[in-house]
Amino acid sequence: MEKIKGKVIVLGSDVDTDQILPGYAMSEPYEEIGKFAMAGEPTGEYKNNYEPGCIIVAARNFGCGSSREQAPISLKQAKVACIVAQGFARIFRRNSINIGLPVYVADIVDKVKTGDIIEIDLEKGTVTTPNGVV
């Protein structure tokens, strides 16, 4: 997979694993935790704009909090195509890579808005936004 294209959902900084997958979802069957992806996100931005294949764009420290490996698994089960952030919590990033959920470090949170379509070229290391290539 060289290129990933999808609709953006913009989130802020410090999106923690309790927002990504709340603790109550941990008692659900493993294969169904994707239904609870981002259920703890307080703004409703994800819930109100989600569609399969979306790309989450966030500021710094995405995936902070616990080392809950189910957090990135829930996003992958929910068919999030990629997460682009200014930075990731180390364990979340490693867990994402281990399960094949693409994560990409780029500072584009102020260059896009929810609903924009962007394309990430993993081979070239570029992100094409409505405002140009980053």
Image (cartoon, helix red, strand yellow):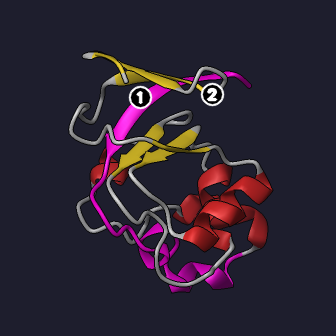
| x 66%, y 85%: residue | 27
- Rendered location of residue 63, percent (x, y): 49, 68
Do we see residue 108 in this rendering? yes
| x 28%, y 42%: residue | 109
Q: Earlier in the sequence, mark 2 or mark 1?
A: 1
Residue under label 2: 122
- Rendered location of residue 46, percent (x, y): 36, 51
In the rendered image, the quadrant that contains the C terminus is top left
Q: Amino acid at mark 1?
A: Lys
At label 1, counting other C-alpha atoms closer than 10 Å, the crowd grade (few under 14, some 14-19, many 20 or more) is many
- Rendered location of residue 114, percent (x, y): 27, 36
Up the image or down, 49 lies above or below 69; here it is: above
Do we see residue 73 in this rendering? no
Q: How many tags in the picture?
A: 2
Residue under label 1: 7
> Which image quarter: residue 15?
bottom left
> Foreground residue, 41 or 17?
17
In the rendered image, the quadrant that contains the N terminus is top right
- Magenta residues, as a range? 1-28
> Foreground residue, 32 or 15?
15
Q: Amino acid at mark 2?
A: Leu
Up the image or down, 128 lies above or below 93; here it is: above
User: Could you tell whether 79 is left or right of 30 in the image?
Assistant: left
- Rendered location of residue 57, percent (x, y): 38, 44
